[in-house]
Image: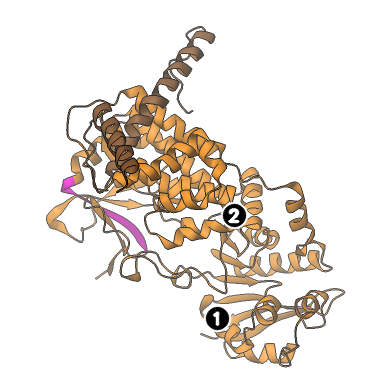
């Protein structure tokens, strides 16, 4: 009998839940949400969202539900190639997700429905663009009511976007600290005073934070409707213009510096690209992860094999550059994510089980670790045996570059510190990795002492 | 509570309660303060939105029916 696993994060909304069976993703829709779901499907809203590629597609199915007593329907959902979370997105990814949410809300109103929540976790990236994944978020709506998701939108989207734009792009990752978005009083305290004078941020963050002080002292009313259609449309229009108006505004010099200091100027770059492309075309992977991707030059080479490629780097600026480039080029197989490998995303949320740790997510067929090992070993003092055990469970294939200590980049990393890395040699590297991997191919990179390996897991 | 703060709080509450009152029950808590603020902001932004759509319609010779976010 097929094993059914319930998605661990799918429990807050009583309307239904996601489950997995035979490698496929399903959603049980409960009776309590039946009428809403039927309206969502029959009103034309589902088809409209699908036509505009705003929603993950699903099909009605007859598979047996995990909880038959409360079932209205079961749908099979198209699988997202790689699950990511808002605290791993760069500025423009989060901004696009925010605009997607507002666009869906605006369209839903045309069909007599509204989003009942506006969580950033309702968005995933698919085919190079954000897509809404929560089929249960739509409820029938008549003008006159307020939008219950207003506060959530501000906490999940406006607050982190403003912090990234007005303080530092690095602050995208602080969303990790709160499962339901950044508290507005925290955002208001961290943002520069000048943002209080901006009509959008001044209202939706600063004034909003002050208004929340009434939270425990007042009740949401239950009287007759008073919010007109134009009032709600005006609020959504303001949220949209506020979101659009938050700009990361990096100076040109910053960008140039990043491009100039990347591996693009390295000797052997073309050879490395050719090798990655050739090896991956032989392996034919479905999923590749490029660790320490920088702006994703080798992720692009890996994508030539037809695989989905997840490019990860700790620097949100290079991930922003990669995202903007790939969005412009309409690259559908590439997903850039902010990930610090020395402190990757842990399991988070209720029971430490709501958001999956990076290490426990879908394992790739191939892991790329190019010009990375010296950063981990020399800058972060990761011993070679710990590096090897880190790579071991990451998939069947490993493409890894060894950058020796006499390489100019390595010398730069240790120029101001004691050389404690006596064991950092090519022989020791091969011996450490050799416990978990067999070396299938080994190529010396032109005009350097660097070596590129194709290794196959012994597991 | 200081006198000044008490007056500020009472004034804010009075504005919120008198200005608007609408149900917004949902499976997530909309937040009472957020809900009141939303009504006030929606009143202001809604007026601006109405003017924007009116002007847009005026200058486009009545071709545009609304000012939505397409």
Q: Which residues are magenta?
A: A23-32
Chain letter, orange in picture: A
- Sooner in the amino-acid sequence: mark 1 or mark 2: 2
Q: Is residue A67 left or right of residue A127?
A: left
Up the image or down, A97 lies above or below A296; here it is above
Label 2's element?
helix
Q: Nearer the viewer, residue B51 or A365?
A: B51
Residue found at x 18% / y 27%: A224
Task: Judge if badges 1 and 2 mark residues of a common chain.
Answer: yes
Chain of residue at mark 1: A
Whether label 1 touches label 2, CB < 8 Å: no
Q: Nearer the viewer, residue A279 or A54?
A: A54
Q: Which residue is mark 2?
A: A169
Q: Between label 1 and label 2, give the one nearer the viewer.
A: 2
Q: Name the colour assigned to chain B in the rendering.
A: brown
Q: Which residue is mark 1?
A: A390
Q: Is residue A27 magenta?
A: yes
């Amino acid at each position: 009998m097929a094993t059914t696993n319930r998605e661990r994060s799918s429990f807050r909304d009583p309307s239904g839940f996601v489950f997995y069976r035979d490698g496929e993703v399903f959603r049980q829709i409960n009776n309590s949400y039946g009428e809403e779901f039927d309206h969502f499907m029959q009103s034309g809203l589902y088809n409209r969202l699908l036509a505009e590629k705003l929603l993950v597609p699903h099909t009605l199915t007859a598979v047996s539900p995990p909880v038959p007593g409360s079932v209205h329907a079961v749908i099979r959902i198209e699988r997202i190639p790689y699950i990511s979370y808002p605290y791993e997105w760069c500025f423009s990814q989060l901004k696009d997700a925010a605009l997607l949410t507002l666009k869906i809300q605006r369209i839903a109103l045309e069909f007599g429905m509204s989003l009942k929540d506006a969580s950033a976790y309702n968005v995933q990236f698919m085919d190079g663009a954000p897509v809404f994944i929560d089929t249960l978020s739509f409820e029938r709506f008549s003008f006159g009511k307020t939008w219950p998701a207003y506060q959530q939108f501000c906490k999940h989207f406006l607050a982190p976007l403003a912090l990234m734009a007005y303080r530092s792009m690095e602050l995208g990752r602080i969303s990790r600290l709160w499962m339901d978005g950044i508290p507005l009083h925290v955002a208001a305290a961290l943002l520069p005073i000048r943002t209080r004078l901006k009509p959008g941020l001044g209202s939706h963050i600063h004034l909003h934070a002050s208004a929340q002080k009434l939270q425990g002292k007042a009740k949401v009313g239950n009287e007759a409707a008073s919010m007109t259609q134009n009032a709600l449309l005006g609020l959504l229009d303001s949220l949209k213009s506020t979101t659009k108006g938050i700009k990361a505004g990096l100076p040109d010099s910053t960008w140039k510096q990043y491009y100039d200091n990347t591996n693009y100027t390295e000797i052997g770059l073309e050879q490395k690209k050719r090798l990655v492309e050739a090896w991956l075309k032989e392996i034919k992977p479905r999923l590749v992860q490029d660790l320490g991707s920088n702006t994703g030059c080798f992720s692009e080479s890996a994508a030539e094999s037809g695989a989905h490629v997840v490019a990860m780097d700790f620097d949100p600026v290079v991930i922003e550059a990669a995202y903007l480039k790939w969005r412009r080029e309409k690259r559908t197989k590439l997903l850039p994510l902010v990930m610090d490998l020395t402190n990757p995303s842990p399991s988070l949320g209720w029971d430490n089980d709501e958001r999956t740790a990076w290490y426990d997510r879908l394992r790739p067929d191939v892991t790329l670790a190019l010009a990375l090992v010296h950063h981990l070993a020399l800058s972060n003092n990761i011993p070679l045996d710990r590096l090897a055990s880190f790579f071991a469970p990451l998939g069947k294939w490993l493409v890894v570059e060894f950058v020796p200590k006499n390489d100019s980049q390595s010398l730069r990393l240790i120029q101001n510190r004691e050389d404690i890395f006596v064991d950092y040699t090519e022989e020791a590297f091969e011996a450490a990795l050799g416990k978990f991997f067999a070396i299938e191919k080994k190529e010396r990179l032109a005009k350097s002492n660097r070596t590129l390996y194709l290794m196959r897991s012994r597991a | 509570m200081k006198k000044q703060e008490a007056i500020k709080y009472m004034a804010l509450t009075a504005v919120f309660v008198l200005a608007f009152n609408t149900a917004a029950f949902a499976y997530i808590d909309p937040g009472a303060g957020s809900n009141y603020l939303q009504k006030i902001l929606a009143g202001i932004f809604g007026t601006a939105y109405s003017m924007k759509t009116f002007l847009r319609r005026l200058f486009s010779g009545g071709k545009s029916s609304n000012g939505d976010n397409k």
